[in-house]
Amino acid sequence: MRRYLLSLIAVGLWPTLTFAQTTTQVVEYYHTDALGSVRAVTKVVNGQVQVVSRHDFKPFGEEVAPQTPPVDKRLFTGKERDAETGWDYFEARYLANAVGRFTSPDPVAGSLANPQTLNRYAYCLANPLRYRDPSGLLVDWGANDDLRKAYEGRIRGLLSSKNKNDRVRGQELGDSYLRLIASDIVFHVSVKKGETDGGGLDYRGSPGQVYVELRGEGTMPTTQKIAHEFEHGVQFLDGKVGFRLADGKWRSAYSDLVDEGSAFIAGFRAEQAQNNQSPLFRGIQDAINTAKGDPLTPVIDYLYGSDSVYKNRSKAQNWPYVSPNGTFPPWIYALPRRR
C-alpha cells in the first residue's frame, strides 16, 4: 500500500514512503516538469538510483503508453488519477483528459472580458501547455454573483463606450481581470460588512488560495473596491507584494506608495471619484486628471503629502522578499518577481 505523506511541490519532488511487507522503508522521489506533471519516479537502493516509472502526456493529460495496472496515482499536473475512469481529480470536478474537457461545468462563471472562459467545460483557456488549473476554478465569487455581474458589466460598458478614454479604461480593467483568471492562484471574493469602507487582499495559510475581501458599505462604490483589490492581486502575481506570518497570523506585507498608488488608479478606472467621497479620494482623482502622461508619480506625490494614513510612506517599491527561483522562508508567502 502506498501512502502519500509529504508534498514538496516547490522543489519539484514528492518524496513518498512505500511500505513493503518487510520493515525496510524505501523513499521514492517524484520528478515533475514545469506544469507539475509527474514525469519520472525514482528510488535509491543500496546507494544506486533506480527508475521506478516514467510518464509522457498528450497536451490535456492523456498518458502516452500508460502502465497497466497503474503504478502511480498522481500524474498530470500532480492531480490524482481515478483508476476506473482515467479522469483526473481537480478538487472541484474531474478532467476527462482524453477529450480535454471537464466532466461538469465550472461552478464559477466565466468573464465577458475573456470569451474563452465562457466555455465552462474548457480546461485552462484551451492552452494546457502554458497554464495549469490548481482547483478546477477561476476567480471564485462565491455567493456574490451579483458583484461579478456588476463588475463585468462595468468593464463591458466601458469597452463599448464611444469615448476613447473609457474604452482604454475598460481594456486595462479587463486585462487585469484576465491575469487573475488565467493564473495558478484561486482568488476568492468575499464581503465583510460592518467595518471601515475599503478592502484587503488576504492569505489564510493555504498555498494557491488568496482572498479579496470587500469591507464596509460607505461611499466607495463596490466596483471601485474590486478594481483596487484586483490590482493588488496582479501585484501579488508579479511578485511585488506578499504576505508575512507574524504573531501567528498572516498579514499583507505591502505598504509603499507605488503599490497603493497603482491600486487607487485601477479603482478610479472602474469608477471615478464621487462628490460624496472623501477629500483624499477627490484629491487622487484630481492628480489623475491633471497628470501629463502616466498618473502614477502625481498620485504618489499626492498620497505622500496627504493628511492620511499614506502620509510620508515610502515612494519606492520596498517589498524586501525578492526571490527569482521562488524560494522563500516559511514565514513568507509570495511569488517570484516577474521581470
Image (tube, grey):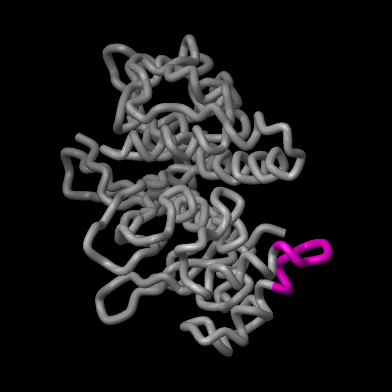
The residue shown at (35%, 14%) is 103
Res 320 quadrant in image:
bottom right
Identify the residue shown where x is 31% and y is 49%.
190
Quarter that holds the C terminus: bottom right
Q: Position of residue 83 (x, y in %)?
A: 29, 18
The residue range painted magenta reads 289-298
Q: Nearer the viewer, residue 232 or 323?
A: 232
Quarter-of-image position of residue 217: bottom left
Residue 7 sits inside the magenta stretch:
no
* Quarter of the figure with residue 284: bottom right
Question: Which one is nearer the viewer's eye here, 14 or 236?
Answer: 236
Q: Residue at x 65, y 33 (%)?
A: 159
Q: Residue at x 62, y 37 (%)?
A: 158
* Quadrant (top left, top right, bottom left, bottom right) of the N terminus: top left
- Residue 16 in the image: above or below residue 121: below
Residue 51 seen: no
State whether residue 250 appears in this view.
yes
